[in-house]
Amino acid sequence: MGVSQRLLPGYLSVCARRRTATAKLRERKRSVRNFNFLWSRTGAAGEPQRTSKQMPMEREGSDGRLFFRGLQNRSHEKMKLRKRKSALYLSPPKSTGRRGALLGENIYLVLFTIALRISNCFLVQTSFVPDEYWQSLEVAHHMVFKYPFNIENIDECYSTLVLNITNYGSLTWEWTERLRGYTYPLIFASIYKILHLLGKDSVQLLIWIPRLAQALLSAIADLRLYSLMKQLENQQVARWVFFCQLCSWFTWYCCTRTLTNTMETVLTMIALFYYPLEGSKSMN
């Protein structure tokens, strides 16, 4: 008798037992589905629902396995939403109004930043681009100061009486064609007007006072950047960002110059700190 003939009866018995176990498992699943259907129908009719903890567990005698008699109807459960841990979804902290605070930050930090930008203003004494004069200071000077009328100077008399040119200052073609706005030069024109009324409109003051004003605005922008990073991330990240901002060579070179790009950078930092405004649709 061959080996295959000896193993064949055992193999057939194993297959028969496997088919029997599969049939029992299918019958068990069918009974569980029927029970769940009846359970949902009786629960909808008014019988109180039973939670999964209250459902009895039965032990089957043959194999000792445990199974649940039914599953809870999940349609009646309350969904629990996961809480977001990111600081971007948290409401901004309310101001505590603590003493020793200026611009929402520690007064020593504010004074340090202002002192650093003022020293930055005096240390940078070079010229970068012509627009730092032709887009701001020259236009402001043209708005405030007039040609001094001197009868001995024929050229000035001709410009004043014949050509009706009374303003003292040169405007480039984009200003004569009215392509630029006067909002930024108006800031320095106000400073020039105050100096003129006080009789302090010397050349050095006309040069350095606007740059000092731009340095103060840049210091405010640095502080707003620090506060913004504290809101979005944490204080440690904000300190590193603030350190990188103060150590940036190009920022050091340009932030105190009277350029429209410098003012745009300042306004962008301040706007990002206050965005979105309270009560706006973006706050929803």
Image (spheres, rainbow, N blue to C red):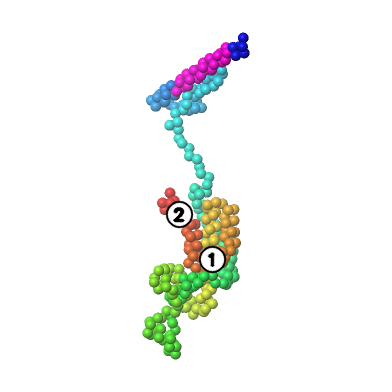
Dot 2 crowding, Cα within 10 Å, few <14, some 14–19, many 20+: few
Residue at which label 1 appears = 255
- Residue at point 60%, 61% (across, down): 247
The amino acid pointed to by label 2 is Pro
- Residue at point 56%, 69% (across, down): 121
Quadrant (top left/top right/bottom left/bottom right) for the N terminus = top right
Please, which residue is most extreme toward the top here? 1
Provide the residue span drawn in magenta: 8-33
The one of 61 and 158 positioned closer to us in this rendering:
158
In this view, 272 is above or below 136:
above
Residue 157: horizontal and vertical position, in percent?
41, 86
The one of 125 and 223 positioned closer to us in this rendering:
125
Please, which residue is most extreme toward the front here? 2
Side (left or right) of 147 relative to 59: left
- Residue at point 58%, 62% (across, down): 248
**Nearest-to-viewer mark from 1 and 2:** 1
The one of 44 and 23 positioned closer to us in this rendering:
23
In this view, 271 is above or below 141:
above
Residue 178: horizontal and vertical position, in percent?
39, 70
Question: Residue 233 magenta-drawn?
Answer: no
Residue 177: horizontal and vertical position, in percent?
39, 71
- The image quadrant that residue 116 belongs to is bottom right
- Residue at point 53%, 73% (across, down): 208
The label on residue 276 is 2
Magenta-drawn stretch, dominant element (helix, strand or loop): helix
